[in-house]
Image (tube, rainbow, N blue to C red):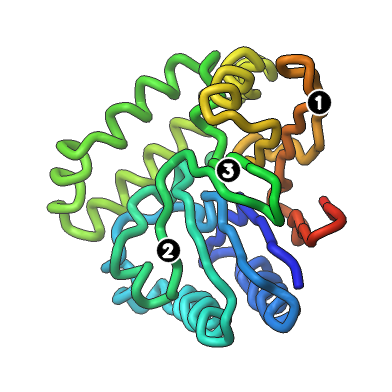
Amino acid sequence: MKTWFISDLHLDIHRPEIIQLFLEFLEQIKPQADALYILGDLFEYWVGDDMLELPKFKSFSAVISKLNELNQAGVDLYFIAGNRDFLIGDDFAKKTGCQLLPDHYLIQLYGKATLIMHGDTLCTDDIEYQKLRTILRSENWQKTFLNLSIEERIQQAQELRDTSKRKTITKQAYILDVNQTVVENIMQEHHVTQLIHGHTHRMASHSFSLNKQTAKRIVLGDWHDAAHFLAVDSDRYILQ
Ligand code: MN
């Protein structure tokens, strides 16, 4: 039995092949999973759980049912919000059987204290993004946004996405990556030597020294062209 970690699938109704890939992935891991941790950006965008009622998003219903099927089969499901799907709410949680976790969360991974997160909070060199994040994560903004009609919300989400894409092109690579000092500070605050996150789409396992101990930061891959995951059991880590 293994514990699985995924992030950055960016599921989109316009890319049915990735939705299909995810459904197959869930079917494959079902008999060999203790738990599945989804570390954000499962969806390309999420404007509120009521979007599932729109006929155009009906391909997401299969994802919801499949997740629920895993949960019913005894797989613990956990979700940490990404920068695209932070409006996933209680209705989604109830329908899938996912437990919604806070932004930074400490788990015991077969005895190893491990901090898990989406990873956007580590990218502090992107000051512009961090400012936007503070607004989007505020209760005030979310309340106002969720009161808009669903069409208006989709429109705004698309505009935010387009702006973010335009700006990303102009930003230097280091700005879009994690800040190592922030990584080390957060790990020390939580007394861990292991961190798992996504967001940057730069799949890798980084080792470095932290308080004279070897620390590890595992970055999950995105699902742009293929399924990527981290699978952990009591004696090994598979990152692919
Ligand atoms: Mn992200």
Looking at the rendered structure, the kind of residue marked 1 is: Thr
Looking at marks 3 and 1 on the same chain, the residue that comes earlier in the sequence is marked by 3
Q: Where is residue 22 in the image (x, y as percent from the top left)?
A: 66, 70
* Camera-nearest residue between 177 and 209: 209
Looking at marks 2 and 3 on the same chain, the residue that comes earlier in the sequence is marked by 2
Quarter for ligand 1?
A: top right
| Label 2 residue near ligand 1, CB within 8 Å | no
Dot 1: element: strand
Looking at the image, residue 4 lies above or below residue 62: above
Looking at the rendered structure, the kind of residue marked 3 is: Ile
Looking at the rendered structure, the kind of residue marked 2 is: Gln
Looking at the image, residue 176 lies above or below residue 86: above
Res 193 → quadrant: top right
Circle 3 residue: 116
Circle 1 residue: 214
User: Which residue does the image show at 86% across and 55% down from the upper left?
Assistant: 236
* Camera-nearest residue between 3 and 239: 3
On the question of residue 191 being in view, the answer is yes
Q: Number of numbered discs present?
A: 3
Q: Where is residue 115 in the image (x, y as percent from the top left)?
A: 59, 40
Circle 2 residue: 99
Q: How crowded is mark 2: few (under 14 residues within 10 Å), some or many (20 or more)?
A: some
Q: Is residue 2 left or right of residue 106?
A: right
User: Which residue does the image show at 59% across and 29% down from the upper left?
Assistant: 191
Q: Residues within 10 Å of mark 1 (few under 14, many from 20)?
A: few
Looking at the image, residue 210 lies above or below residue 187: above
| Label 3 residue near ligand 1, CB within 8 Å | no
Dot 3: element: strand
Q: Where is residue 83 in the image (x, y as percent from the top left)?
A: 45, 41
Looking at marks 1 and 2 on the same chain, the residue that comes earlier in the sequence is marked by 2
Q: Residues within 10 Å of mark 3 (few under 14, many from 20)?
A: many
